[in-house]
Image (spheres, rainbow, N blue to C red):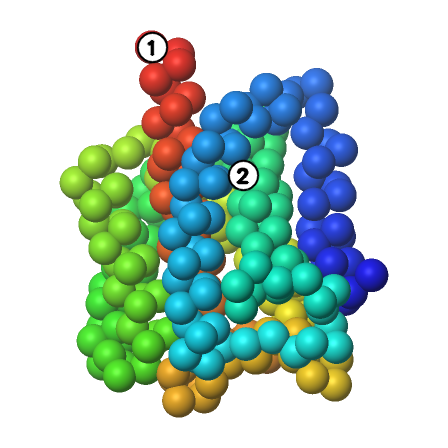
């Protein structure tokens, strides 16, 4: 089994088996999570395929199973399903076990700062495709979902996003070569700023936000529609 597959198994094993926890009952929310994930995963697979063709990023074959969908390895396709599952699991766990921690006020500052930073970086480094796309899209998502739609769960999302930084550093660190001779996923230096968190491009933080925020939005919308 490939290294990338082992990373995915390590990512999903705990969240999957703990989904049946009596206090969280995450398995009851699968009917909302799955459609939300597949909608956003479709967009990200198109984005990923396009950037792979342009060689903005790519994959080291020695760490892959060798099964491809277009130019994307199977592991990369599964990434967009399994990682959101793990993160939304964290989202529900934090709400169940820490209901008094809402991060409402901090969410205001986070939204403003993250949006401003995303716009500044996206415009300053507009010629760097990964930097510009990840930063600007994350800023636009925040403007549209948080400021225009005024969602009430944003504080909980921010709490989750910050907690998920720990597994993010581990998973993305392995993928970008922190513990291997070559990175599982490599990046074209011409399309990123070059600032890295260990071996992780700074842009990955915005990229993950772009993926998880709209999934959470659709997930919460489906849940609220059902309850109403």
Q: Is residue 11 left or right of residue 151?
A: right
Residue 171 x %, y %? 65, 62
Tell me which corner region of the image, top left, top right, bottom left or bottom right, holds residue 119.
bottom left
The answer to whether one can see residue 24 in this image is: no
Q: Secondary structure at mark 2?
A: helix
Q: Which residue is mark 1?
A: 228
User: Residue at horizontal 57%, vertical 59%?
Assistant: 69
| Residue 203 picture location, percent across and down | 42, 71
| Label 1, residues with CA under 10 Å away: few <14, some 14-19, many ≥20 | few
Image position, residue 211 (x, y; %): 43, 52
**Farthest-out residue, top:** 228
Say the numbered circle drawn on residue 52. Answer: none
Q: Is residue 206 above or below residue 184?
A: above
The answer to whether one can see residue 199 in this image is yes
The reply to whether callout 1 and callout 2 are in contact (CB within 8 Å) is no
Q: Secondary structure at mark 1?
A: loop
* Residue 217 x %, y %: 36, 37
Check the image and report above or below for 130 versus 162: below
- Check the image and name the residue furthest to the right: 1
Tell me which numbered mark, 1 or 2, is placed earlier along the sequence. 2
Q: Nearer the viewer, residue 40 or 100?
A: 40
Is 14 in front, or is 112? 14
Few, some or many C-alpha atoms within 10 Å of disc 2 (few <14, some 14-19, many ≥20)?
many
Q: Identify the residue at horizontal 49%, vertical 77% (top origin).
A: 57
Q: Which residue is mark 2?
A: 88
Q: Name the residue rendered at 76%, 33% in the picture.
A: 17
Of residues 129 and 205, the one drawn nearer to the viewer in this rendering:
129
Q: Which part of the image, by quadrant, shows the N terminus? A: bottom right
Q: CA distance from mark 1 to mark 2?
A: 22 Å
Q: Residue at x 74, y 58 (%)?
A: 5
């Amino acid at each position: 089994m490939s290294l990338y597959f082992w990373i995915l198994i390590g990512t999903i094993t705990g969240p999957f088996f703990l989904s049946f926890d009596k206090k969280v009952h995450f398995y009851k929310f699968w009917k909302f999570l799955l459609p939300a994930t597949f909608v956003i995963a479709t967009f990200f697979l198109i984005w990923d395929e396009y950037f792979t063709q342009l060689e903005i990023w790519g994959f080291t074959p020695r760490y892959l199973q060798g099964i491809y969908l277009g130019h994307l390895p199977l592991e990369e396709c599964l990434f967009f399903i399994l990682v959101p599952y793990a993160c939304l699991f964290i989202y529900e766990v934090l709400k169940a076990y820490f209901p008094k921690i809402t991060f409402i006020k901090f969410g205001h500052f986070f939204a403003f700062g993250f949006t401003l930073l995303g716009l500044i970086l996206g415009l300053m480094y507009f010629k760097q495709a990964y930097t510009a796309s990840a930063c600007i899209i994350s800023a636009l998502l925040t403007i549209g979902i948080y400021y225009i739609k005024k969602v009430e769960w944003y504080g909980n999302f921010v709490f989750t996003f910050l907690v998920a930084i720990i597994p993010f550093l581990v998973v993305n660190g392995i993928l970008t070569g922190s513990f291997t001779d070559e990175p599982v996923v490599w990046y074209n230096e011409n399309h990123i700023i070059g600032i890295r968190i260990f071996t992780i491009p700074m842009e990955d933080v915005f990229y993950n936000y772009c993926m998880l925020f709209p999934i959470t939005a659709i997930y919460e919308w489906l849940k609220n529609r059902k309850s109403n």
